[in-house]
Structures are given as C-alpha cells and as structure tokens.
Amino acid sequence: MEVILKTDIAGLGYKNDLVTVKPGYGRNYLIPQGFAVMASETNKKVLAENIKQAAHKAEKLKKDAEDLAAAIGDLTLEIPAKVGESGRIFGRVTNTQISDTLKTKGFDVDRKKITLDSEVKSLGEYTATLDLHKEVKHKVKFVIVGE
C-alpha cells in the first residue's frame, strides 16, 4: 500500500515522501492518526504541486540547518549526572538533557531530533546525532561529569 506522509515519522520517512507500507499499518494507524493519506492519482498530483511550491522554502530550511550545524561544529557539551562509587550514573541521560544543554549554549534543537548513538551508563564521552533536516545530520560530543 502506498501512502503520502503528512509528517516526519522516524524509521519510515519525511513529510511529503511517498512510501510503501503494509496495508494494516496504513489503514489502521497512519491514515486515522492523520500522519498519511492514500497515494491516489489526485493526491500524487497535489503532492507534486506542493513540492514545487515548497522547493524555495525547503532550500531556506536546509540552509538554516546547515548554518546551525556549522555553528555547533565540534562543540563538546558537559552534562552533569549523579554518580555512584563505581562510576555508573544514577538514572539516565536523555535527549531532553542534551537539548537543554544546547539551549543554554544558544542553540535551539528540539529533543525529538536528537538520538543517542549508544546507551549512557557511566562517566565518559559519548556522541549524539542531531537530525536537523532531512539531508543535514550532525554529530555532537557530550561528556558525562559527576555532580
């Protein structure tokens, strides 16, 4: 079953992408939730027209994402965490904490666009991937320090 995505969906595609999904997933989840529409001929023509009109706007968004990635550059974030005697942290370090730390540095990145490359369990240096745009992904290093 082919559907046209109305929003970005992790692991499936980005807004205005034409994707093939299993019929049950499309009929019972994507379409009722408003995440997608059926890929009929008329909807495909509407999509083509929307893409044409949005090309300029998309170019500006991509440039803004590239500028943000360049501004962040090789920045290393320090994230404090409570640590036990063995060096393991209590709780978890989440994408929300990384987003808040970036915000204090002057970069506004939505927490939903941040994915941790590995699970954070102890002190040390880790990386996270910022999904700034469909074509712009940026890796940022962060260090977990004890409080």
Image: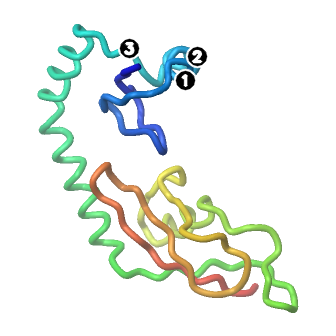
Q: Secondary structure at mark 2?
A: helix
Secondary structure found at label 1: helix
Establish if 8 lies above or below 129: above
- Residue 59 placement (x, y as % from top left): 16, 46
Point 35% across, 61% down: residue: 137
Q: Earlier in the sequence, mark 2 or mark 3?
A: 2
Front residue of 6/20: it is 20
**Amino acid type, residue under disc 1 in the picture:** Tyr
Structure colour scheme: rainbow
- Quarter containing the C terminus: bottom right
Location of mark 3 (residue): 38
Estimate how packed mark 1 is, as few (under 14), some (14 to 19) or many (20 or more) residues with alpha carbons within 10 Å: few
What residue sits 72% from the left and 82% below the top?
Answer: 122
Q: Which residue is mark 2?
A: 28
Distance of label 3 from label 1 (alpha carbons): 12 Å
**Contact (CB < 8 A) between labels 1 and 2?**
yes
* Rendered-image quadrant of the N terminus: top left
User: At 23% from the left edge and 10% from the top edge, which residue is drawn?
Assistant: 41
Q: Which mark is residue 25?
A: 1
Of residues 40 and 83, which is closer to you in this image? 40
Instruction: Say which element carries label 3.
Output: strand
Q: Which numbered dot is residue 49? A: none
> Which residue is most to the right?
85
